[in-house]
Amino acid sequence: MMEEKVTYKKTLTLFQVVALGLAWMSPMIYFTVYGLAYEGSKGMMTGSYSMAAATILLTAISYIVMSKRFTSSASAYTYVKKAIHPYAGFLVGWVVLLEYIFSPVISCLTFGLYMHAQFPDIPASLWIIAINLIFAAVNIVGIRFSAGISKIFVVVQILFIAVFCSYLLKGLAGGAAAVAVQPLLPQGDWGISTILTGASLVCFSFLGFDTVTTLADETINARKTIPRAIMLIVLIASVMYIVVSALTKLVFPSLVFSDADAAGFELMKLVGGAGLQSIFISVLILAVFTQGVIAVTSASRLLHVMGTDSTLPKRFFGKLHAKYKTPVNSIAVVCIVSLLALVLNLETAIKFVSLGALTAFVFVNGSVIVQLYVKEKKRSFKQTIVYLVIPLCGACFVGWLLTLLDRTALYMGLCWLLIGVAYQLYRSRLTVTAILLRMGLEKSPSSVKRQRT
């Protein structure tokens, strides 16, 4: 009796997909990296965010192009596999696993640290284990439930940012409208390299728009919905980050923080006192929770697609739960890996995520050129701009950002890539052996044993 094939439910609307993407991105991350971004850009955060937004927009256009061309899930893995080569797709998918697998690690670790700070008597490890179990339960129940939670908590984050901006606008009461461009103008010791360095740091704040492509199999009319969602996510994030940084610069032309890692907390106290600071901590914890839920969702979907392709063991990763229509085995693996939050530090986890994301961006831009411009020969003036110039600019700039990662991150990425190459060679050897056995060109172990007997 043949086993009935279990497939995903197509339930996600445009609003839900946008909410999930923003939940992964987590708008509140603007404040958690504020000190690092401020110091790296020497206070020119508006220029740095504008530059980063332009760069991300170029790559987002490439994701939109490829999501229309290939509507199946798995993002960069699928695009590179179909446009360039299956082996290239595997290697990109393997590296992208760093972004997807280690994102829940960051969520668990951050949640544990913040909760331990609020409740010092409870060890951070207990919070990490507890939130990891909740992530697993929410994802097993289904993507629609995850979308509902994400929608609520993303709205809360955006409302908090609006409240924060209202405090800043009060501080500007009576100011001249002409100074509204001040944050974008060069001041003091600056240079284009300063803005670019800042942009390389704040690009981390935009990571997440690409993850919605892993939800294509669960999205209603994915060919139209996913591209629209990608563009909306990038535009919403860009407007938020640029507006907040501009207003902050107008109210506080110069800032000095006692602790760069806690700059967000110090900024809250400067803007709204202890009351705003308390609200900030609560909203930040909700943001971390929401980001963790969708991070597990995206990572498990990538593992499932790689399983259905037999890139990873199909019997394990390729299965969906009969009742919930979710990849329970993949979810379990992601949550087990997330327990690395018990032993890793935040810096190491962020390095893995950045390396995986930037690598994916380079290859997705390259996939557009190979698939549309080279293979399909779409070379009119407009097509040349969209299918060659834009992705080439995006790939070059993102590639430059990759070179800014420190040697430790690059060495870790190289080691992970070599593990992937070794696994692929082992998998290819097994495949070739199976084909030869079918053709009778290689004797099976059982036949060799019989001959010896």
Image (cartoon, rainbow, N blue to C red):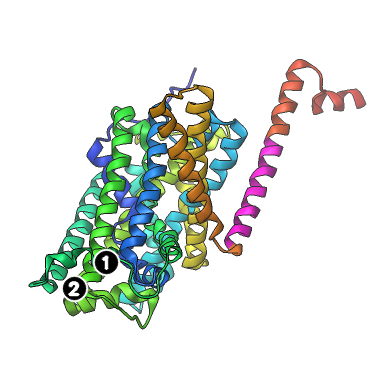
- The residue beneath circle 1 is 183
- Seen as rendered, the residue at the extreme bottom is 258
Give SS at disc 1.
Answer: helix
Percent x, y for residue 279?
20, 70
Q: Is residue 37 above or below residue 95?
A: below
- Out of 325 and 245, give the one closest to the viewer: 245
- Seen as rendered, the residue at the extreme left is 174
Percent x, y for residue 446?
80, 26
- The residue beneath circle 2 is 276
- Amino acid tagged 1: Pro
Find the magenta span and give its range: 409-427
Residue under the point 73% across and 27% down: 432
**In which quadrant is the C terminus drawn?**
top right
- Out of 323 and 20, give the one closest to the viewer: 20
Number of marks present in the image shown: 2
Q: Nearer the viewer, mark 1 or mark 2?
A: 1
Of labels 1 and 2, earlier in sequence is: 1
Circle 2: is it few (<14), some (14-19), or many (20+) Cα within 10 Å? some
- Seen as rendered, the residue at the extreme right is 452
Tell whether position 224 is magenta. no
Q: Is residue 56 above or below residue 38?
A: above
Percent x, y for residue 347?
49, 66
Residue 315: assigned label? none
Give left or right: position of 136 versus 388: left
Tell whether position 422 is magenta. yes
- Amino acid tagged 2: Leu
What secondary structure is the stretch in magenta mostly built from? helix
Q: CA distance from mark 1 to mark 2?
A: 24 Å
Give SS at disc 2.
Answer: helix
- Out of 199 and 77, give the one closest to the viewer: 199
